[in-house]
Image (cartoon, rainbow, N blue to C red):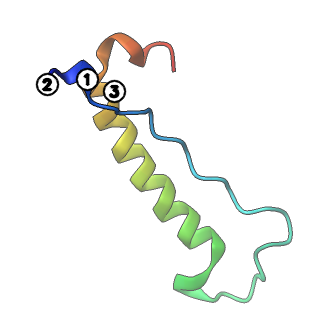
Amino acid sequence: MTHDDVFDPQPEPPEPPHDGECCESGCGEQCVWTRYNAERAEFERQITAWRARHPADAHFR
């Protein structure tokens, strides 16, 4: 099996919280913004790795 035979879609960024979704009570780890920022950091790690695996496709995305 070659690298081209493996299904490896480009990662999608997480959706930011919608207006009013944050309760602004300083809930820490459960805050929608805390979770979003963690998901965004993971997405950045994944997209960097994906671009390294797909250098010919990376400039299109």
**Which is nearer the eye, 28 or 36?**
36
Residue 53, placed above or below residue 19 = above
Q: Residue at x 44, y 33 (%)?
A: 10
Q: Residue at x 51, y 21 (%)?
A: 61
CA distance separating discs 3 and 1? 17 Å
Query: Which residue does the numbered mark 1 point to in the structure image?
Result: 5
3 or 1: tag closer to the N-terminus: 1
- Give the percent coordinates (x, y) of residue 51: 33, 26
Q: Do the residues labelled 2 and 3 touch (CB within 8 Å)?
A: no
Q: In this view, does 26 lie to the left or right of 39?
A: right
- Amino acid type at circle 3 is Arg
Badge 3 density bin: few <14, some 14–19, many ≥20, Cα 10 Å = some
Q: Comparing marks 3 and 1, which lies closer to the viewer?
A: 1
Badge 2 density bin: few <14, some 14–19, many ≥20, Cα 10 Å = few
Query: Which residue does the numbered mark 2 point to in the structure image?
Result: 1
Disc number placed over residue 15 in the picture, else none: none
- Describe the element under mark 2 as helix, strand or loop: loop
Q: Which residue is drawn at 63% across and 89% down?
A: 27
Outermost residue to the left: 1
CA distance separating discs 2 and 1? 6 Å
Residue 33, placed above or below residue 48 = below
- Give the percent coordinates (x, y) of residue 30: 58, 84
Q: Residue at x 57, y 63 (%)?
A: 36
Query: Which residue does the numbered mark 3 point to in the structure image?
Result: 51
Q: Is residue 18 left or right of residue 29?
A: right
2 or 3: tag closer to the N-terminus: 2
- Amino acid type at circle 2 is Met
Q: Are marks 2 and 1 in contact (CB under 8 Å)?
A: yes
- Give the percent coordinates (x, y) of residue 53: 25, 26
CA distance separating discs 2 and 3? 20 Å
Residue 46, placed above or below residue 36 = above
